[in-house]
Amino acid sequence: MTASHGGGDLIAAIYDSVIDPSRWDEVVKRIVEVTKSFSGNLLLQQAGAGSLTALYNVDPVLAEAYAQTYHKNDPLRTPAWSLAPGEVRVCTYTQTDSFRASAYFDEFVRPQGWANLVATGLARTPDSFALLALTRSPDAVWVEPAEWRLLEALAPHLQRAAAIHGLLARTRATAKSLAAATGFAVFVLSGNCRVLFANPKAEDLVRRQTGLRYECGQLAAATPALTQRLHALAGAGSWSGRAKGDIGGTIELSRGENCPPLLAHVTPLAASRAAAVFDIDRPAAAVFVVDPAAGLDAQIERFAARFGLTLAETRVLAEIVGGNGLLAAAAKLKITEATARSHTNHILAKTGTTRQTELIRRFFETVLPGA
């Protein structure tokens, strides 16, 4: 039996479903049919990227009941029956007396006519869970050798597809959040400053040539010196030996005479798994451009409330985000430098950061819509 059994290329269909998730139901149906199973359920869950469920021959009412209630008692979710990614297993626990005496069996399994379960593990980490479960009818409890070999052949492709689906789902969620950001422009850059993403406010800045421009696909500033500084900060994000929170910086972007400069906060991004899946530039840095004159009062207040900052600490935070150092912040707030430093240390402690560049990164990550 081959992966194309039943018409078409089943492996290709699996990867097509990564691009178009609506096709997963058809893939599950084909796997159920080619393995002579009773029904099928593909479950993909990842923190921060939502979940996806594809079903075939499963009662939708009971499927909803599973999502709401019965998943808490599903033996497949317990450590004793955890499946390694790519592992195919006949779950014989369904034949035990204790399982048949359970409410999970009596209220969820038996009404659907299941006699056994064959499961393929796809992902199991602290923030993700994915598997393909095929239920067997009483007259087809045991999987024939050819069917078993097919499942083993499909398992690594399903595992890889689940990983790519999770990556794309998280990427889409991040892009949606960045695009919805209000009050500041956002650029995502590769290590060589190539622009990978720009929200509408960022595109407007470039279109009006307000402090930033595109030059051969790269983000550039108004002067060669500022461009060099911008590229150096963005490039540092791709340095594998950097320490967490070790890099980042702020650049003043000139807008011409009689106009206060914009502030560009350049912060490193965590290493992405995209490079291991796609041959594309890895995001290395984000650039958050703010207008100090316009302010970020609403965002600063939300951030302060989330981390329990006092009024005095909130005022110091506003100066830090606005690009002022401790001396300038102290002078503007009419406090001593020692007091400003003390407030800053309290802010760092409350937000779990160790330096101002890391604090700025935490601020923008937190105030993005959907963060």
Image: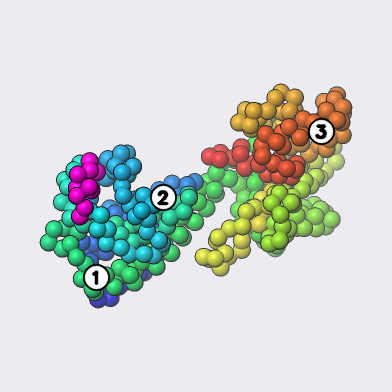
Residue extent of the magenta highlight: 95-105
* Gap between marks 1 and 2 measured at Cα: 27 Å
Q: Earlier in the sequence, mark 1 or mark 2?
A: 2
* Above/below status of 283 relative to 255: below
**Of the residues shown, which amino acid type is indicated by label 1?**
Glu
* Gap between marks 3 and 2 measured at Cα: 43 Å
x 21%, y 53%: residue: 96
Residue wearing tag 3? 341
x 23%, y 73%: residue: 145
Asked where in the image residue 190 lies, by quadrant, the reply is bottom right
328 and 262: which is toward the camera:
328
Q: Give percent across and percent down for residue 333.
A: 82, 25
Residue wearing tag 1? 147
**Mark number, residue 112:** none
Q: Give percent across and percent down for residue 189.
A: 66, 56
x 31%, y 43%: residue: 73
Secondary element under disc 2, as helix, strand or loop, is strand
Kindly tell me whether residue 89 is visible in this rendering: yes
Residue wearing tag 2? 45
Location of the N terminus by quadrant is bottom left
